[in-house]
Amino acid sequence: MDKRFAVLIDADNVSDKYIKPLLDEISNDGVITYKRIYGDWTRPALSSWKQVLLNYSITPIQQYNYTQGKNSTDSAMIIDAMDILHSGSVDGFAIVSSDSDFTRLAARLRESGMYVVGMGEKKTPNPFIAACNRFVYLENLGQTQQADAPKQDEGEAAVSVKVIRNTIGTIIDEISDDDGWANLSEVGNILLKRYPSFDVRSYGFTKLTPFIKSLGMFELYSVPSEKGNVRVMYVRRKT
C-alpha cells in the first residue's frame, strides 16, 4: 500500500519553478494527501504563485508577519505539522524549505515514526539535512522535465503524447534497477499520480502495454508471477 504524505511548503524559501518536479518526486514514494503552502500572501513578491497553486491544487495558508524581522510562517507550518501528525492520517511528511528552523520539527516527526523527506536548495544547513530520512536538493529536480512540461494554462487534459512519453522515460530512470528495467504497473501508478487525468483511451488504446509499445522508445518483457496465472510486465528505455 502506498505511503500517504503531507507536503508542507515554505513559500518564503522556495521558488515556484520547483513545484511540479518536487511533487513528482514525492509521488515516487507515495500518495500526496495534504498539499499546503505557507506565506504572507498579501506581499506582492508572492503574487506569481497564484496560477501555480491553482494548477496543482495546493492550499495556501495565510500567515502575517506580525513582528518586523520575524518569520511567522515557520510557526504556522510547525503547528499544522503536529496537528496532521496527531490526526493519524499520514505516514510521512515532505518539508520543503532551506531553513534550519525546521530541524527540530523533522527530528520530532521521525521520533513519532514518520518518514521525513526534506527538500531545499543547496544552501540548506546540514543540521536540517541530517534530521530527515532523505533530503533532496531542489536544484537536482526537474532537469529532464522542464522543457517538455505542459504549459501552466493548458490543464491536464491537454497533456500531449510527447509529454507523457518523456515523463514515462523519467519515471523509468528514477525507479529502474541496475539494468534499466522497471515494473510497468509501478510506472503506470506513478504516471497517474503525476497526471490524474491520464487515460490510455484518450490516445486510442484500451491497455497501457500497447500504448507503451506505440511510443517507440521502450522495450518490454514479462515473467510469470508467483501465482503462475498472471505475468508481470517490465519496461525500459530501448538501448
Image: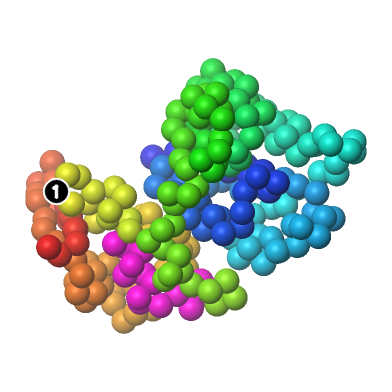
Q: Quadrant of the N terminus?
A: top left
User: Which residue does the numbered mark 1 point to in the structure image?
Assistant: 179
Decide which of 33, 54 is in the foreground and name it. 54
Q: Is residue 22 magenta?
A: no
Q: Quadrant of the C terminus?
A: bottom left
- Please say whether residue 221 is visible from this viewpoint: yes
**Residue that appears at 82% across and 55% down:** 43
Horizontal side of 46 relative to 171 (left or right) equals: right
Magenta segment boundaries in residue numbering: 155-169
Q: Residue extending furthest bottom?
A: 204
**Position above or below: 154 against 54:** below
**Residue that appears at 75% across and 47% down:** 39
Horizontal side of 87 relative to 119 (left or right) equals: right
Q: Amino acid at mark 1?
A: Asp
**Predominant SS of the magenta segment:** helix
Query: What x and y, as percent, mark residue 149?
Result: 46, 69
Query: What x and y, as percent, mark residue 165?
Result: 31, 70
